[in-house]
Amino acid sequence: MSNLYCIKGDILYTKDFGSFETIESGYILIEDSKVKGVYKNLPEKFLKVKVTDYKNSLIIPGLVDLHLHAPQFPNIGLGLDKELIPWLETYTFPEESKYDDIEYSKKVYSKLIKEIWKYGTTRCCVFATIHKESCKLLIELFNTSGLGAYVGKVNMDYDSPINLLEDTDNSINDTEELLKEYRDKFPLVKPIITPRFVPSCSDKLLKSLGELAIKYNVPVQSHLSENRGEIKMVADRYPNEPNYASVYNSSNLLGQTKTIMAHCIHLSDEEITLLSNKNVYVAHCPTSNVNLSSGIAAIRKLINNGVKVGLATDISGGHTLSLIEVMAYTMQMSNLKWIESNYQDAPLTTAEMFYLATKGGGNFFGSVGSFEEGYDFDALVIDDSKEEPFNYLSLEERLQKFIYSGDYKKIKARYINGNIVNEPNL
Ligand code: GUN
Ligand code: FE
């Protein structure tokens, strides 16, 4: 017997980039954790299915965070008057070196996951630290929470502070151990190969991680072209590579398996073509990009060139774990890009931005981020009934108000893979 149920409310999602699908007072039918259909009127044969009626609430797909650093949670808001490299050296590396301590890891990571849940994020891609045991703990905690996540042990064996500098062979062996242990252990939480970025990895390490990605068919996440100083470090070290992206590509870390690259602000046209051809996902981190004075990513241009894009908080370069806020920043930064590009790169519409926050990033996880048939049922129920009803608002306008209010307290229920997920008890 399949498990069928139905929820009712004001449904809004994006199937195609640039347009909303909306049904006021409609039904979503869920069968065995997946969307079976969305209806204005429930078909006759389903009239006996149990319906949960979220009267006058918005129902939208869960939000997907394609890039964040779990160990940087205690640093949120710190040091954002610096650029990337001094910020890493002054704040980030000292904090990340603490995660050889399992008790400290547990304290931070438990609280972090509750916060991620609070803001309506249902799936995320996460950097841990170099520490194997702490990374295992993070994977286990995510699994207990009911959230979906890719979690990566960070690899660093080059030009890094002494207490974050790994022995190359240990780095490779620890990574392989994690892949073996967690590749098939949990349905919604999986390991991901995570070289921090080219400047902190030796060539041998990059090549070995690429081999592991292919051997175990696991995805990859890293940083690409965030800051001009960073790009120069890579260019100086690899004079024979045409660009930064090709360093990853030469090590089988750019689309040989599913790949996310965070930032991608200062890409050349050749790099954009490479990312597009390799089906690489760009994690767009607008809060981080403005905080660390990194720049404004050319999201319109990336999309026009066929690059996949999702949104990300990138804490603690980003100062908020709330994708609701990041959605507003995405709109604002795209407006600035429009001006900066001399009115070439048109600003994103709400529907386009919302696609990135849901289906754009969700597709990295499979059929996630939409209410089309066969999609994993991830949803947020948003009660905005306390808004002053000065005027009639369409569903799209209600979503706009929710986004710009940043008010996560309006989220009344969260579904992930067909299950209601309550505040994690960690
Ligand atoms: N590049 C390498 N490491 C980091 C990090 O922790 N945060 C950001 N924003 N960029 C990075
Ligand atoms: Fe990052």
Image (cartoon, rainbow, N blue to C red):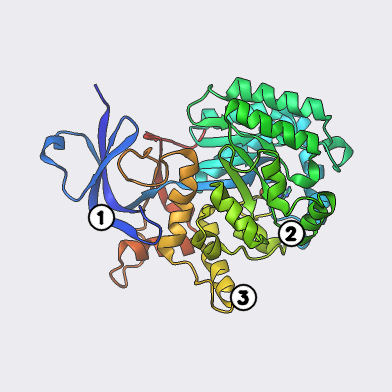
Identify the mark nearer the N-term, 3 or 2: 2
Whether ligand 1 has any atom under 8 Å from the Cβ at mark 2 is answered as: yes
Please state the horizontal and vertical placement of residue 355, each as a whole percent of the image: 43, 55
Question: CA gap, disc 2 to disc 1?
Answer: 43 Å
Q: Nearer the viewer, residue 340 or 351?
A: 340
Front residue (pair 221, 49): 221
User: Which of the numbered marks, if any, corresponds to residue 227?
Assistant: 2
| Mark 1 CB near ligand 2 (8 Å cut) | no
Residue pointed to by mark 3: 340
Find numbered disc 2 in the image and state the secondary structure of the residue it sits on: loop
C-alpha gap between disc 3 and disc 2: 18 Å
Mark 3 lies on a secondary structure that is helix
User: Residue 381, how many percent across, how many down?
Assistant: 37, 48
* Label 2: how many Cα within 10 Å (few below 14, some 14–19, many 20+): many
Q: In the rendering, which numbered label is found on residue 23?
A: 1
The circle drawn on residue 243 is none
Rendered position, 384 above or below 43: below
Residue 392, above or below 86: below
Q: Amino acid at mark 1?
A: Ile
Q: Position of residue 413 (x, y in %)?
A: 39, 43
Up the image or down, 167 lies above or below 239; here it is above
User: In the visual, does 58 lie left or right of 322?
Assistant: left
Corner quadrant of residue 204: top right
Of the residues shown, which amino acid type is indicated by label 3? Glu
Q: Quadrant of the N terminus?
A: top left
Residue 231 appears in which quarter of the rendering? bottom right
